Amino acid sequence: MTAIRARPAYHEALSRLNDRHLLRDLSYVGGCWVAGKTGASFKVTDPASSTTLAWVASLGREEAYEAIDAAADAYAAWRALLPQQRASILRKWYELILAAKEDLALIMTLEQGKPLTESRGEIDYAAGFIEWYAEEGKRINAESVTSHLPDAEMIVRREALGVVGIVTPWNFPTAMITRKAAAALASGCTVVAHPSSETPLSALALAELGERAGLPAGVFNVVTGDAATIVGAFCDDTRVRALSFTGSTSIGRLIAGQCAATMKRLVMELGGHAPLIIFDDADLDRAVDIAINAKFATSGQDCLAANRIFVQRSIIEAFVEAFAKRIATLKVGNGLTDAVDIGPLMNERAVAKVEEHVADALNCGAWLAMGGKRHPAGPLFFEPTLLVDPSPDALIMHEETFGPVAAVTPFDTEDEVIARANDTEYGLIAYVVTQNGARQMRLGRALDYGMVAINRVKITGSPIPFGGWKQSGLGREGSRHGIEAFTELKYLCVDTTA
């Protein structure tokens, strides 16, 4: 395999890149930039304009195994480094990412569509995981055990698991890579990553910066191409000891089944169906701010998005009026345009699902307060939409919408809303807005979710254990718990009589 520089891309806005070498269209395997053996490629487009950004190499199953070969070959040397040595490389990677923030944000907005301000925020968020785990890797300490045997010393320690497969989605194309890869790399594992074929350029730019930071060949690999083919190889290969996946629950179940034969460690961040519960003692303006941010960030294409907004009946009219006024101020357009709040949806399938949910809710008796159709900005844009009082049987009350559609429904009592909020197979995050301190604690305990946000929206970051209950996932990402999945416990019992 020989290194090849990226071929020219076609989108006018790419001329704004300060560092054109961050735009890569080849996979990164064993420290080299490689095309597939067949020469096949796939098109990456800007969802805001449908303009071509690049043609990216489409690798097959054989090349996926070659990437696993590279990671397996690099594992022993990477694992043998002192944690401080790995941390130094990770820290350099972190610094290079921050230095390239404007270019990385531009690439992300072009391939994903989110507003540029959100892309910049994601780069900071993504880099934070590398900084965190550069330090956390130094603290995988040995654990002393009080011996129950005479003349024996007992030690328990964590050791790196091996090669880790990473599979990431299109909605957070940089942060979902770093949240997984930084923990695995800091522990001493090597990584083979497969990004979404809709947003591979952000992952490849990370690989370019990782190479510059000094990640040794084979330690971090990025394989682009057909997901079923590449992920299938990850699942089947016994050398891949852990697989970390972010995506839909349905795909997560399939991957878990495929991994059963090789008994892999699984970390899965799957679907969400977040309730936002607003009580009548809430400050109305603050409640509206929380609802706007919880629902419409990333154009609603976020597993943390509030999909069901429950408002206590005594204030629902006032809330809907104020909420609708705020929604009306949201600016829809190309994410490269200043002050845009809502970008395009990712693809036609996403728009069709949003349309289906809106039509079904209206058929089930909901009142359309505003929006409800595609936006004239382009075929993948959808109007910010407010539905009021959909039936409990409506699809939007049971399925993740993944679009800029807010569904508001009344409730009367605390017990009632807890039961309704918990009536889902998902359990990722719930939001609560109330000034009653005792109620805050009761709801925090009663809601069957891995994360509960009280009187705020932003709660994620590198120090916290991100993850859900029930069908929303397995394991945790971020915090000290995020590194545990990529390590194995080893127990040593040493005879002291000699």
Image (tube, rainbow, N blue to C red):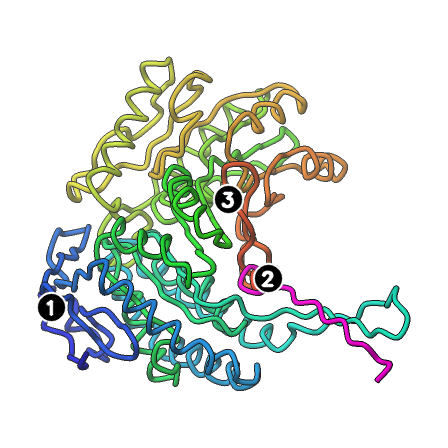
Q: Nearer the viewer, mark 3 or mark 2?
A: 2
The residue carrying mark 2 is 484
Do tag 3 and tag 1 residues touch (Cβ < 8 Å)?
no
Residue 118, image x, y percentages: 37, 58
Toward the front, the furthest residue is 498
Amino acid tagged 3:
Gly
Amino acid tagged 2:
Glu
Q: Is residue 303 magenta?
A: no
Q: Residue at the location (27% across, 36% down)?
A: 383
The residue carrying mark 3 is 473
The residue carrying mark 1 is 9
Identify the image quadrant of the N terminus: bottom left
Instruction: Find residue 230 and report its image quarter.
Output: bottom left
Q: Residue at the location (48% across, 39% down)?
A: 291
Q: Secondary structure at mark 1?
A: loop
Q: Measure the alpha-carbon separation of dots 3 and 1.
A: 37 Å
User: Camera-side residue: 11 or 434?
Assistant: 11
Q: Measure the alpha-carbon separation of dots 3 and 2.
A: 16 Å
Q: Secondary structure at mark 3?
A: strand
Neighbor class of circle 3 (other Cα within 10 Å; few <14, some 14-19, many 20+) is many
Give the residues drawn in magenta, as a range: 485-498
Q: Residue at the location (81% across, 67% down)?
A: 145
Dot 3 or dot 2, earlier in sequence: 3
Q: Measure the alpha-carbon separation of dots 2 and 1.
A: 40 Å
Residue 400, image x, y percentages: 40, 34
User: Camera-side residue: 444 or 329?
Assistant: 444
Dot 3 or dot 1, earlier in sequence: 1
